[in-house]
Structure formats: structure tokens, C-alpha cells
Image: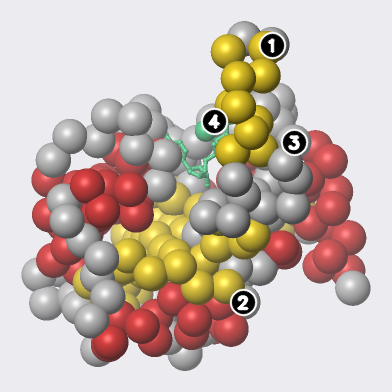
């Protein structure tokens, strides 16, 4: 089976508030993006990689891939205005014969071989998509402004992460339609009738949103 990984790194990183886009902020010596890129390159599950980057960052990514000897990197494409549009741009580089497409946020650097296996294995058991998820520890409230309207039962809720894996034709079908309001790939696949499974996520797949997140991720790398 041929598995293509789309690494989406085209966000601005507004909440992090650095001068450069989030994927290019330094994590140790190298840009943040280097960590998930190296992990995808070294994974025995991944055959090819497409990276979506902000305008004018295509060349730095190709140079970074060379520096990391990341020979699975096939293309660096310009992303879009939203995450979903960036996924669509990267997906356009995936050849017709690809069987599986895995989509991962560059902002979640600590990808592991175990989580890749967990999301890829069920695709041979009749699922159209598989996502990592974590139970929610906090009590969840529905609000109207600052007034609490209801307490939502946690039992049926999970917080979903990436990498998310899909049968390639299903993901293409999902991305051929309207992308409005989609914050992850699985919601679009579900919206076109796909069956999506949730498997155990990983706390260390934390998305680097703020400076504190980045420092926490750095400390995890060090241990
Ligand atoms: N992403 C993308 N294209 C966009 C927006 C987001 O490829 N137009 C990617 C980001 O690079 C990131 C992932 O989607 O790897 C998750 O997005 P998020 O954490 O929100 O990153 P940013 O959009 O960069 O951050 P912010 O929302 O704070 O600007
Ligand atoms: Mg964003």
C-alpha cells in the first residue's frame, strides 16, 4: 500500500505571535517543522511527503528537506487561507494510485511510530478514516456569552488530534466539496458519508499554539 503524508505548515501562527510563521519558529537548533518532517521521513509507514507552506517558504522547506536527507519529500506547495485549503493544495500533488493519505499538523511535532500505526491499521478493516482522540478531563459547559446554559456530558466526547489517516478516494471526495467551517479532515469525510474510527491519541501530540506549549514540547524532546 502506498501511504502519502501531507504535512500542513502554512499557518501564520498568530497566537504564538512570532515574526515568522509558526512552522519556522526555532525548536532547539532547527525550525519546528523539522521535527515532524524527520519523524515522517524515518517512519516505516510513510512512502512520500508533501508539505504545505506559507507563500515564499517553499524553497526554505526544500533546503531543509535536503539538510535532513528527507528524500521522501516530493513537493512543497503554497498553502491556502485556511487549514482545509492548505490540505486541498497538498492533496492536489498526490498521484491517483496512492491508496492512503495521512494528514498531519506541523504544529504537533511529537509524532510517534506507535500513533502512526494506530491510525493506519484500521484502514484495512473497512474504515474510511481513523483519527487519534483523547478523553476530556474537564467538565464541559455550553455557554451563551458568559452565562452557562448547560453541562454537556463528557462520556461521549473526545478531543481529536492529528495524524488523521484516510483512504485516498474518500479524502479526495471530501475535499472536492465545500470546505467552509472545517477544522479537521475527518469532519469533511464524515460529512460525505465516510465511516471514521477514533483510536487512542497521545498527550505529547499537543498542538503548539502558545509560547508555553512550545516550551513544554521542548522539555518533552529533552527527556
Ligand atoms: N495551517 C495551514 N494553513 C492554514 C492554517 C493552518 O497549513 N491556512 C496548519 C498550521 O500550519 C498548523 C495546523 O494547520 O500546522 C493547525 O493550525 P494552527 O495550530 O491553528 O496554526 P496557525 O493557523 O499557524 O496558528 P494561529 O491559528 O495561531 O494563526
Ligand atoms: Mg489557525
Q: Nearer the viewer, mark 3 or mark 4?
A: 3
- Residue 169: x percent and y percent? 13, 66
Find residue 118 and report its horizontal and vertical position in percent: 49, 81
Mark 1 and mark 4: Cα distance apart in space:
29 Å
Q: Position of residue 107 (x, y in %)?
A: 60, 50
User: Which residue matches tag 1?
Assistant: 146
Closer to the eye: label 1 or 3: 1
Earlier-in-chain disc, 3 versus 2: 2
- Neighbours of disc 1 within 10 Å: few (<14), some (14-19), many (20+): few
Per the model, the C-alpha gap separating discs 4 and 2 is 25 Å
The Cα atoms of the two marked residues, 3 and 2, are separated by 22 Å
Q: What separation in Å lies between label 1 and label 2 (alpha carbons)?
A: 39 Å
Q: Are marks 1 and 3 in contact (CB under 8 Å)?
A: no
Mark 1 and mark 4 lie on one chain; the one further toward the N terminus is 4
User: With 47 as the anchor, is 156 left or right in this view?
Assistant: right
Foreground residue among 199 and 5: 199
Q: Note whether 17 is above or below 194 in the view shown.
A: above
Respond yes or no on whether mark 4 lies under 8 Å from ligand 1: yes
Q: Residues within 10 Å of mark 4 (few under 14, many from 20)?
A: some
Mark 1 or mark 2, which has the lower sequence index?
2
> In this orientation, does residue 64 appear?
no
Q: Which residue lies under the disc numbered 2?
A: 112
Q: Which residue is mark 4?
A: 12
Label 3 sits on a secondary structure element that is loop
Between residue 63 and residue 154, name the one nearer to us: 154
Real-space Cα distance between discs 1 and 3?
A: 24 Å
Mark earlier in primary sequence (4, 2): 4
Residue 120: percent from left, percent from top: 39, 80
Residue displayed at 33% across by 48% down: 187
**Residue contact between numbered discs 3 and 4, judged by CB atoms under 8 Å:** no
Amino acid at each position: 500500500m502506498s501511504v502519502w503524508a501531507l504535512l500542513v505548515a502554512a499557518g501564520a501562527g498568530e497566537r504564538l505571535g512570532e515574526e515568522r510563521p509558526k512552522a519556522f519558529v526555532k525548536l532547539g537548533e532547527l525550525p519546528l517543522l523539522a521535527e515532524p518532517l524527520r519523524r515522517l521521513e524515518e517512519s516505516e509507514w510513510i512512502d512520500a511527503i508533501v508539505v504545505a507552506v506559507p507563500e515564499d517558504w517553499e524553497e526554505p522547506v526544500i533546503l531543509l528537506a535536503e539538510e535532513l536527507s528527507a528524500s521522501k519529500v516530493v513537493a512543497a506547495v503554497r498553502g491556502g487561507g485556511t487549514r482545509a485549503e492548505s490540505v486541498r493544495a497538498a492533496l492536489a500533488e498526490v498521484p491517483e494510485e496512492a491508496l492512503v493519505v495521512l494528514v498531519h499538523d506541523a504544529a504537533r511535532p511529537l509524532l510517534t511510530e506507535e500513533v502512526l500505526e494506530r491510525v493506519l491499521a484500521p484502514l484495512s478493516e473497512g474504515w474510511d478514516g481513523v483519527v487519534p482522540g483523547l478523553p476530556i478531563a474537564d467538565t464541559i459547559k455550553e455557554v451563551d456569552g458568559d452565562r452557562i446554559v448547560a453541562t454537556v456530558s463528557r462520556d461521549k466526547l473526545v478531543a481529536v488530534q492529528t495524524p488523521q489517516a484516510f483512504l485516498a478516494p474518500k479524502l479526495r471526495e471530501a475535499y472536492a466539496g465545500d470546505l467552509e467551517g472545517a477544522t479537521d479532515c475527518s469532519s469533511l469525510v464524515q460529512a460525505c458519508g465516510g465511516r471514521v474510527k477514533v483510536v487512542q491519541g497521545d498527550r505529547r501530540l499537543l498542538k503548539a499554539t502558545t509560547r508555553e506549549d512550545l516550551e513544554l514540547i521542548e522539555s518533552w524532546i529533552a527527556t
